[in-house]
Image: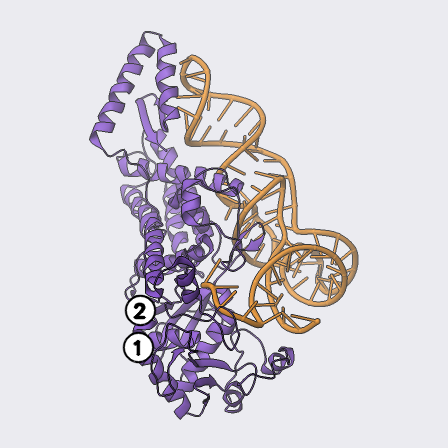
Chain colours: A purple, B orange
Amino acid sequence: MIYNSLSGKKEEFKPIQTPNVGMYVCGPTVYSNVHLGNCRTFLSFDNVVRYLKFIGYNVRYVRNITDAGHLVDDAEEGEDKISKKARLEKLEPMEIVQKYTLDFHHVLRLFNALPPNIEPTATGHIIEQIEMVKQIIHNGFAYEVNGSVYFDVKKYNEKGYNYGELSGRNIDDLIAGSRALDGQSEKKNPQDFALWKKASPAHIMRWSSPWGEGFPGWHLECSAMGTKYLGEQFDIHGGGMDLKFPHHECEIAQGKACNGIEPVNYWMHANMLTLNGKKMSKSTGNTLLPHELFSGENNILGKAYSPMVVRFFMLQAHYRSILDFSAEALNAAEKGFHKLMNAKKIINQLQYKKGTVSESENNRINQLIQDCYTNMNDDFNTPKTMAVLFEMVNKINKLNTSDNMDISEEVFSKMKTTFNGFIEDVFGLQSEEQADDSIVKGVLNLLIELRTEAKNNKNYALSDKIRDELNTLGVQLKDSKEGTTFSIN
RNA sequence: GGUCUCUUGGCCGAGUGGCUAGGCAGUGGUCUGCAAAACCAUCUACGGCGGUUCGAAUCCGCCAGAGACCUCCA
């Protein structure tokens, strides 16, 4: 089941061509560093892709890079964002694009997000966009004025289509609600949107077209690239909630006007990440950058958090809910994450110990395994799935401390596979321990040995010193009947 | 102003017309030289006011508060 923004309901997911799934997600405009809010959307869809793959679908995941300069504001004339930034940073526009594309990739890699199968750029698909404009004009849904081409929303609706179906607006409201003070606009109607804009002399990013030198409209690139790599109609289109209107609304209109077919079957929208109760946004400056979070260099949270903790934190909320960022919430996430990963380590080291098998316990575990799938199948409910994993954590810890197991070997290994699979493959969470280094391990084991000796000699001052000093370094010692083990936070 | 969404216990966050989500924190206990970890037990809920219903935090209405979109934004 997937919640489809177009219908406003959860719907059974039926790919056009099982087991193949075509999925497009709107990528970033690379004119500045990605902030955490941007990351949330990409991580939400990373989980969608991961889960679909996990249950056997063959996903073609396309995510674009918007590198053609779009205007800073809605003015008829004006500077585009990339050129503006290029001027401010004294760089070529394409240097800006390169710089922030690399930053974007770097950050997503830290978050362990899978790269898309295709990552097309807007500037690399100018020809396709021009072709699309031509086709829309040919089909009678667009008009040229003075070197620019606009989509004719009114005509589109007269032909029986419905501009506003995705965002739940009706065109009369839009007309009534728009400011009527732009007498000098060249558009026929204020809600018409640009497919192609004429470039002013100062505009650096420009291309030749049948309508003169100009640049493509923002909404067009996704339609053109989605069509090129996934077909005129494909399965899933994702993006942030804030792109619903007008961006995705326009994409639907363009797809239908160009190809006469519903371009996307399932529209998915990820909700915003807020900071101080307000949406993170580049334009308002209410942002937190990933490196500020990882390094702790910010005056909001007071300490550093690792990418995996942040990823875990986001998984604890549903992708369609607003999630607010706070130090308290992150601290809780950090502890929870370590608890989860610790249980993962335990189950992977644990040997099956035969005991009296309890049928009800067997069933209980099987139910938990099943619940993981049931919850993810219900519109990718990661928080609910996470709750199930924590019930498994409880089971794992119990198995670890008991002398024999009350479940069958088959169920035990099934739980192990499921637990590992959901944490690593579906949720993309990795252990942050760097203790696999054999020297570090050797040294630690030596210290533990010395401490045990000290303890046996009742030299607690020394044994505590070893433990406390290690703790300060982030190494935690745990004493149990079998001996002392360590874990690195 | 228009359209829409949200309001859950100390914090974060799921969820369903009747059956304790989960995480973090707190409290009591087991274990321990003391801790930590783990385990067991346990305490705080569903913005306010009405209505529908045998029963609503879950459905409806009103009120209050917050947010999103209507302009580039994930």
Q: Can residue A415 be seen?
A: yes
Q: Earlier in the sequence, mark 1 or mark 2?
A: 2
Quadrant that contains the N terminus of chain A: bottom left
- Element on which disc 1 rests: helix
- Element on which disc 2 rests: loop
Quadrant that contains the C terminus of chain A: top left
Q: Nearer the viewer, mark 1 or mark 2?
A: 2
In this figure, which residue is indicated by the disc labeled 2?
A120
Q: Residue at x 62, y 83 (%)?
A: A172
The subunit letter for the residue under badge 2 reads A
Q: How many marks?
A: 2
Q: Position of residue B18 (x, y in %)?
A: 61, 52
Q: Position of residue A26 (x, y in %)?
A: 40, 67
Query: Contact, CB < 8 Å: mark 1 with mark 2?
Result: yes
In this figure, which residue is indicated by the disc labeled 1?
A228
The subunit letter for the residue under badge 1 reads A
Residue A43 badge? none
Q: Nearer the viewer, residue A351 or A423?
A: A423
Amino acid, disc 2 = Pro
Q: Residues within 10 Å of mark 2 (few under 14, many from 20)?
A: many
Q: Can residue A352 be seen?
A: no
Q: Position of residue A218 (x, y in %)?
A: 43, 74
Compared to residue A486, the image places residue A262 above or below, namely below
Q: Residues within 10 Å of mark 1 (few under 14, many from 20)?
A: few
Q: Nearer the viewer, residue A82 or A457?
A: A82
